[in-house]
Amino acid sequence: MNTLLIAEHNNETLADATVKAVTAAAQMGGECHVLVAGSGCAAVADQAAKLDGVAKVLLADDGQYEKQLAEPMAALVVGMADNYATIASPASTNGKNFMPRIAALLDCSQISDITAVIDANSFERPIYAGNAIQTVKVTEAKKAVTIRSTAFQAAGNGGSASVEAAGAADNPGLSEFVNEELTKSDRPELTSAKVVVSGGRGMQSGDNFPMLEKVADKLGAAVGASRAAVDAGFVPNDYQVGQTGKVVAPELYIAVGISGAIQHLAGMKDSKVIVAINKDEEAPIFQVADYGLVADLFTAVPELEEELGKAGL
């Protein structure tokens, strides 16, 4: 039986999370089919068709799928689920919204946040804030899976899958989109940025975060924060990296004034290179850091900005 991967996108561009999730879905047995559900999203389907490992793209282009609300998305997926042993999606905000409903309607198990595919029915997923890895084997004929995309490499662009139209399902009419307020920024989105500069409680105040933003701008980086900094009101919730925030795995993660609680480490320890700046040499963050600097951040960060300027950044 084949695998159906529900694409994450903004109706214009395929999300990086989906490109990486294809790598996982292609290992789950049978062919990997990608469902692109949205409004005016034909370009997204064309992008998905070019990914290695994708055998077919199903395009459901209808106004009710523009914001991927849980109820209409679940109705659509359940209507085509008979052809698939596995229904999968990235473990994104949208995926975490509609996948539990899909699993409930199909009366099947959901395996969340997988980080490795052992075989078509066996997966690995982190538990206890990432301090242990659980191996899950599913014996049911059908399963729902969310994929922690930061754990997988992006699929290549050598594919040439066909794109087929998929008819819209009846809208249950249980919810409707009202409005959204999006944070506007010229910086990269936190979960897809190649470089992330994060601040913690050691920043002392939200007024000090512009110091990190200057470094981030020179590096083309996103700005993040620990839960302690968010809870203290230094920065908005969408900056939060960690178990209860966003999971990131950039090429470079710079942690400034972050002690390294396990909840924060769960959201960033898969970063390729971790740099920590903290005046407490016993801070847990140094246990996972590739490079550590024991220093006062209010001295070290301006010096870092100055050196980046000298380097032409």
Image (cartoon, grey):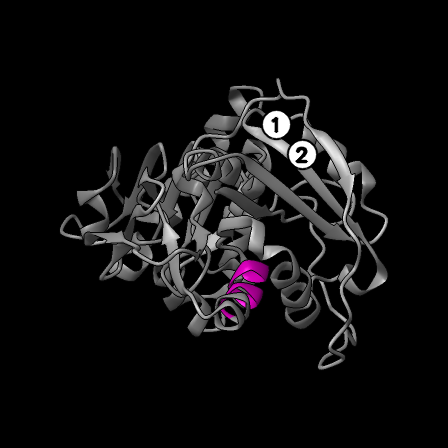
- Give the residue drawn at x 52%, y 58%: 239
- Give the residue drawn at x 76%, y 60%: 65
Tell me which corner region of the image, top left, top right, bottom left or bottom right, holds residue 290.
top left
Q: How far is the residue under mark 2 from the one under mark 1?
A: 6 Å
**Disc assigned to residue 245:** none
- Please give the residue where the numbered disc 2 appears in the rendered image: 48
Contact, mark 2 vs mark 1 (Cβ under 8 Å): yes
Secondary structure type for disc 2: helix
Reply above or below: 154 against 81.
above
Where is residue 101 drawn, in percent x and y? 54, 71
Where is residue 47 drawn, in percent x and y? 71, 32
Q: Amino acid at mark 1?
A: Leu
- Please give the residue where the numbered disc 1 appears in the rendered image: 51
Reply above or below: 95 against 179.
above
Q: Amino acid at mark 2?
A: Ala
Left or right of residue 213, residue 66 in this image: right
> Which is more toward the observer, 141 or 251?
141
Reply above or below: 78 against 252.
below
Tell me which corner region of the image, top left, top right, bottom left or bottom right, holds residue 128.
bottom left
Residue 281: in sight, yes or no? Answer: yes
Give the extent of the magenta segment. 93-100
- Give the residue drawn at x 66%, y 72%: 71
Where is residue 192 drawn, in percent x and y? 55, 41
Residue 204: in sight, yes or no? Answer: no
